[in-house]
């Protein structure tokens, strides 16, 4: 047999093995349960032509589990059949008002059924969904909406002042969370909820980057399917997600991590518990009240849960939790252990980005062994030097990822750096002797002090292990002698007031001298985005550095 023939056969065998592995993973979720023959026929008829979109998940759930709970929020519970019929009617209403397939519809909603209905109605129209950050100031909203070509905005009533001040979508605004005229609820009452014909092509979602260094960019995403070990099913293979289990999505739904779980809940017919604002005690109460199986968070939410007094946390039964899924930023040092000591070995931390989806997953066994690891890789990962060459094992390099879920580029033009099909995450990291990934920091955050490279995240990880420190962030500012110097901002634990000199000594005991912050400032809180990432540019300006 010729070598190329052997390669071809080997490739087909490998793909078949990956497909089998993927099917096993899907089967483990429980999503492939038997369906009554009449519902199977209805499912085939109704889902035909919809492609892979949020609408498809809603339609399938309404057919398979019509009376199952879809959403639990401040307005009560809504089942899958009702959600499907309401969003059919809302889609007809949006179309009657002039919304067309492919037109960008902005969604400016906090977590709740209004967000879910807006996304589903837009998806059923075939419109592109622009997920807008509820923390925007009017100029930011205006800039992003203009760049994305937003013609219709669906927004919460409480955000009406923001929308009006921005001047976005004059005359084409729809309220999401009220029964008033001009609302999604009014559209549902006035229009027919019967099944719709699928649009010419499935809608796409534009997810905004975190915007920690400037105006958020729009990252266009379609839903990709792959049975490979590096595709979306890698999540089901590595994280114990199960169909029809109650999921509390605390992470913002407009963020990539929250939106991913909206898609998962739609596909798996899982009830979603949603609240418009994150309140740590309410989260614990909802876990007990609704017997929540899965909690979806960003790391700062875990910090705030653990910051509750022990007597408050002990009031609530959190034993139903089987999975705490965290992503969006790195887990601060020691946080993983504290979370698992409080809630059991249920924590899974996913590393990735809006642009590359996920690249590594650390489960409880990995985090117990090494709380700082991002875990084993679930995609192809390469660590490259500044010239695009692979670094030696164990050495630090820029993190590049290849998988079927890479984004399609920024809506305003451009993309991330790509080398041989591998896309940059913007992070720097290394692989340890077990092949587990460690993320050392952001390329843009690294400072050079006295000729030595310093990653703020490493210093922050030491500071937060101090018994009197709740949170910490470090930034670099210009220095005449050393080029740059490190400044630390520290949030003390309640009732504590650590001396800056003691904190510098604490760092000195663990790290090289050039990594010790030259100054330490105690603050009440750190400036963060709505998804919990530290706004370093704000701290840099406060420390006397140049604007970010």
Image (cartoon, grey):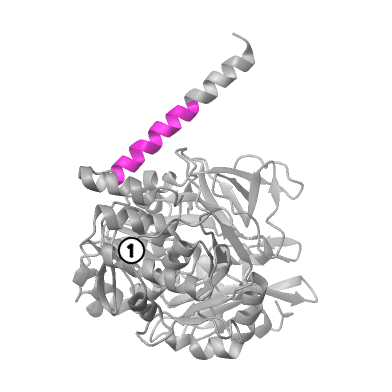
For numbered disc 1, what is the local secondary structure?
loop
Q: Position of residue 200 (x, y in %)?
A: 53, 54
Going 58% across and 44% down the picture, which residue do you hit?
Answer: 381
Look at the magenta stretch and give its main secondary structure: helix
Reading the image, the residue beneath label 1 is 194
Residue farthest top in this picture = 1
- Work out whether residue 355 or residue 487 is closer to the camera in this orientation and state it: 355
- Work out whether residue 476 or residue 129 is closer to the camera in this orientation and state it: 129
Say whether residue 276 is visible.
no
Q: Position of residue 406 (x, y in %)?
A: 58, 50
The image shows residue 135, relative to residue 9, as above or below, that is: below
- Work out whether residue 91 or residue 159 is closer to the camera in this orientation and state it: 91
Residue farthest right in this picture = 480
The image shows residue 442, relative to residue 308, as above or below, that is: above
Going 60% across and 52% down the picture, which residue do you hit?
Answer: 429
Crowding around mark 1 (Cα neighbors within 10 Å: few <14, some 14 to 19, many 20+) is few
Q: Horizontal placement of 235 versus 83: left or right?
A: right
């Amino acid at each position: 047999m010729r070598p190329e023939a052997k390669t071809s056969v080997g490739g087909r065998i490998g793909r078949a093995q990956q497909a089998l592995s993927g099917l096993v993973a899907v089967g483990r979720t429980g999503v492939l349960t038997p369906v009554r023959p009449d519902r199977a026929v209805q499912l085939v008829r109704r889902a035909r032509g919809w492609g892979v979109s949020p609408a498809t998940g809603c339609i399938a759930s309404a057919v398979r589990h019509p009376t199952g709970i879809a959403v639990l929020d401040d307005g009560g519970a809504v089942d899958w059949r009702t959600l499907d019929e309401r969003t059919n009617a809302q889609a007809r209403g949006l179309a009657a008002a002039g919304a067309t397939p492919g037109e960008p519809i902005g969604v400016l909603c906090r977590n709740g059924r209004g967000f879910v209905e807006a996304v589903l109605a837009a998806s059923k129209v075939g419109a592109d969904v622009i997920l807008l950050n509820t923390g925007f100031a009017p100029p930011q909203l205006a800039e992003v909406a203009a760049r994305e070509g937003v013609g219709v905005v669906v927004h919460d009533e409480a955000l009406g002042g923001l929308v009006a001040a921005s001047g976005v979508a004059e005359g084409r605004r729809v309220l999401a969370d009220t029964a008033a005229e001009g609302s999604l609820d009014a559209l549902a009452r006035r229009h027919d909820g019967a099944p719709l014909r699928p649009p010419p092509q499935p809608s796409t979602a534009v997810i905004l980057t975190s915007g920690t260094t400037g105006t958020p960019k729009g990252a266009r995403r379609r839903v990709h399917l792959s049975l490979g070990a590096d595709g979306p099913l890698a999540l089901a293979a590595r994280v114990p997600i199960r169909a029809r289990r109650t999921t509390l999505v605390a992470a913002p739904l407009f963020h990539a991590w929250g939106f991913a779980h909206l898609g998962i809940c739609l596909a798996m017919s899982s009830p979603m518990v949603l609240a418009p604002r994150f309140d740590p005690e309410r989260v614990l109460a909802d876990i007990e009240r609704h017997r929540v199986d899965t909690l979806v968070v960003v790391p700062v939410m875990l910090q705030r849960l653990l910051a509750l007094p022990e007597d408050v946390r002990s009031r609530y039964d959190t034993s139903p939790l089987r999975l705490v899924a965290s992503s969006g930023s790195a887990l601060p040092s020691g946080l993983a252990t504290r979370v698992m000591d409080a809630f059991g070995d249920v924590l899974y931390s996913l590393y990735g980005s809006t642009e590359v989806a996920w690249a590594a997953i650390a489960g409880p066994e990995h985090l117990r062994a090494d709380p700082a690891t991002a875990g084993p890789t679930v995609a192809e990962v390469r660590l490259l030097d500044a010239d695009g060459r692979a670094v030696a094992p164990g050495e630090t390099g820029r993190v590049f990822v290849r998988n079927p879920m890479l984004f399609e580029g920024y809506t305003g033009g451009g993309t991330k750096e790509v080398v041989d099909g591998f896309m940059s995450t913007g992070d720097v990291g290394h692989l340890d002797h077990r092949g587990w990934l460690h993320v050392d920091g952001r390329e843009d955050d690294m400072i050079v002090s006295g000729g030595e490279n310093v990653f703020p995240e490493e210093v922050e990880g030491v500071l937060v292990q101090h018994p009197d420190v709740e949170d910490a962030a470090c930034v670099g500012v210009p220095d005449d002698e050393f080029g740059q110097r490190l400044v630390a901002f520290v949030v003390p634990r309640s009732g504590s007031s650590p001396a800056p000199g003691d904190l510098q000594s604490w760092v000195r005991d663990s790290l090289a001298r050039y990594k010790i912050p030259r100054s330490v400032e105690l603050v009440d809180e750190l400036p963060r985005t709505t998804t919990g990432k530290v706004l370093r540019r704000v701290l840099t300006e406060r420390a006397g550095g140049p604007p970010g």
